[in-house]
Amino acid sequence: YRFHEEVLDFMKSRSWPGNIRELENFVERLVALAPPNTRVLDVSVLPPDFRKEWQKLKRVLELDQSSRSLKESLAEHEEQIIRRALMDCDWNQSKAARLLKISEHGLRYKIGKFAIQKPIDK
């Protein structure tokens, strides 16, 4: 399984008072709730209590983003698009560059610019 960017943001935003056990239980719950043949765990598999918390977080983030400059907002959006393309192409940079219709060199530059790293698979 892989986590959708929004689910990762949600997980990073929580303090997890129960520490690693609570986080571990949360991940197991997501996997159990995921429909069969699901590869990416997105917000649709969040349990109702966590989904409400995520919606509150999303509203706060949207308010925060409205005070940002156009340049910052565009850069963040560009980074998200690049991350999604890399994930969709299993981190094959050649395929991702073709999908994005940019050169491989341009993609490598942007990966460095945004410090994008492939998640470590366990």
Image (cartoon, helix red, strand yellow):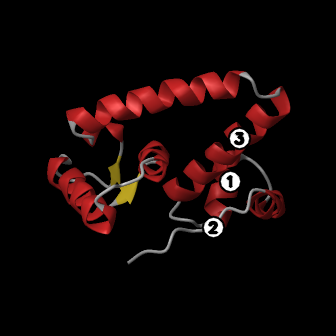
Q: Earlier in the sequence, mark 3 or mark 2?
A: 3
* Front residue (pair 108, 67): 67
For the residues bearing labels 3 and 2, Cβ distance under 8 angstroms: no
The residue under label 2 is which amino acid type? Gln
Q: Residue furthest front?
A: 17
Q: Report the residue at 48% width, 47% height from top.
A: 13
Q: Which mark is residue 117?
A: 2
Q: Which residue is mark 3?
A: 76
The residue under label 3 is which amino acid type? Glu
Q: Which mark is residue 80?
A: none
Q: Quadrant of residue 48?
A: top left
Position of residue 11 measured from the top left corner of the image (x, y, whole percent): 41, 51
Q: Earlier in the sequence, mark 3 or mark 1?
A: 3
* Front residue (pair 9, 116): 9
Apparent side of residue 25 relative to residue 23 in the rendered image (left or right): left
The residue under label 1 is which amino acid type? Arg
Q: Report the residue at 57% width, 31% height from top.
A: 61
Q: Which residue is mark 1?
A: 98
Q: Quadrant of residue 17?
A: bottom left
How far apart marks 3 and 1 lie (CA) works out to 21 Å
